[in-house]
Amino acid sequence: MDVWCAIRTYPKHAVELGNPIPQEPVFFLKSRSTIVPFGQIDTCGGDVHHEIELVLKIGENLEITDMAIGLDLTKRSVQDNLKEQKLPWAQAKSFRGAAVLGDWVPFDARAEYSLAVNGNEMQFGSLKEMSWTPNELLEKLAEWAPLQSGDILFTGTPAGVGPLTPNDVVTASLYIDKQLVLSHRAQCV
Ligand code: ZN
């Protein structure tokens, strides 16, 4: 099982990090052993940024079967340093505990999701605001990637990313048609 991740799929988030808005989706990989459940987030001394994302599970015919909300945790200062040197990002994106993954529910294109830190909403995502639909993302990835059944795809984060500090309480929520479907909490250490 591989963990694929798309970046800059939300134009507003690309702009907030000073990145260009790509014409084609861009992907990277996290190690599968980075996956941890919600519950506790290691903030690595405050260098970790939250990125809430809709995560898709890929089925036998390389179709989207299920969805979950996840956190593509990012060591932002490490990433900035590596980007500056034009080096790969693994240390910033694939460290221990870097992929927080919630429960799976059947995929629904009406999905929206939010992330709150200490009760304050910091990020809100809607598939309608993404540059590509989930199916378009998957099709673009499948053009060159050795996708397999059971692989998962983080679909990129909306605007509002920011640092987490010890004792923060993170709440990630998933909505379909404005109805709360599930909510996960994590305590930062
Ligand atoms: Zn991300």
Image (cartoon, rainbow, N blue to C red):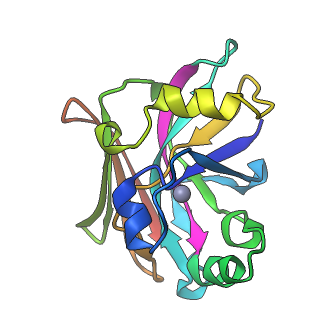
Q: Nearer the viewer, residue 79 or 117?
A: 79
If the picture is divided into quarters, which one holds ligand 1? bottom right
Residue 144 placement, left or right of 167? right
Determine the image quadrant of residue 158: bottom left
Residue 69 placement, left or right of 87? left
Q: The magenta stretch spans which residues? A: 64-75
Q: Nearer the viewer, residue 166 or 50?
A: 50
Q: Nearer the viewer, residue 127 or 139?
A: 139
Q: Nearer the viewer, residue 149 or 43?
A: 149
Residue at the extreme front of the image, as rendered: 23
Residue 93 x, y percent position in the rendering: 67, 65
Q: Tell me the quarter of the image containing the N terminus.
A: top right
Residue at the extreme right of the image, as rendered: 146
Residue at image x 55%, y 76%? 48
Residue at image x 66%, y 35%? 141
Q: Does the rendering let one see residue 189?
A: no
Residue 176 placement, left or right of 99? left
Residue at image x 67%, y 76%? 83
Residue at image x 75%, y 72%? 91
Residue 93 placement, left or right of 50? right
Residue 81 x, y percent position in the rendering: 67, 85
